[in-house]
Image: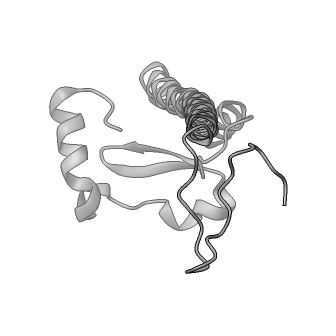
Amino acid sequence: MVKLFDDVAEPSSAAGTYAPVPRRALPVLLTAVLIFLSGLGGLAYFDQTNLTRHKEAEAADVRSKLTQLQSRLETSLGQRLFLSLGLEALARSQPDISTADFEHVARIMLVGQTGVRGLMLARNNTVGHVYPQESNRTSMGINLMNRPDQADAIREAVSKRKTIL
């Protein structure tokens, strides 16, 4: 046993119990408890600060990924929009375009395009040109007004004289 003070209580001989802690030891114990609690408080503060910093870094990473996704989506939609505008310009400038010329232009238009399976050109609502022909041959000659999923869009395009996506 380490003796801190000269007046440390000795067990009483009668009951075998210790006397209360001397008054001089109380400030030392209180100081130790305060230092311990301060250390715990500091540790909790630094832990909370680190957690906040981590959450902010994660949020910045998510924002960055969303911005990249938005950019790719805008690029993809823009490419498809310009593709449809190019096809519309082709149809207006060459209303009697030959199959060979359509295939040539369509091949050029689809270079580097992803997500576009093919192009169709319809005159009087009937598909007359398709590219690529191998995978779209069955679409040739279809009257698009007879397709319920496309009839409303075709009516709107004809009435507004605009391309409808």
Count of numbered marks: 0
Tell me the residue at 55%/35% (across/down).
41
Of residues 8 and 81, the one drawn nearer to the viewer in this rendering = 8
Left or right, 67 with respect to 160, comes to right
Name the residue at the left extreme.
Answer: 159
- Report if residue 46 is visible in the image: yes
Locate residue 89, reporting x and y percent: 47, 21
Residue 165, quarter of picture: top left
Locate residue 44, reporting x and y percent: 57, 38
Q: Is residue 143 above or below residue 7?
A: below
- Report if residue 69 is visible in the image: no
Locate residue 108, reporting x and y percent: 72, 31
Tell me the residue at 57%/34% (across/down).
27
Residue 58, quarter of picture: top right
Name the residue at the right extreme.
Answer: 2
Tell me the residue at 42%/22% (across/down).
92
Locate residue 157, reporting x and y percent: 24, 36
Name the residue at the bottom extreme.
Answer: 15
Of residues 34 and 21, the one drawn nearer to the viewer in this rendering = 21
Q: How is the image coloured?
A: one colour
The N terminus: image quadrant: bottom right
Of residues 47 and 53, the one drawn nearer to the viewer in this rendering = 47
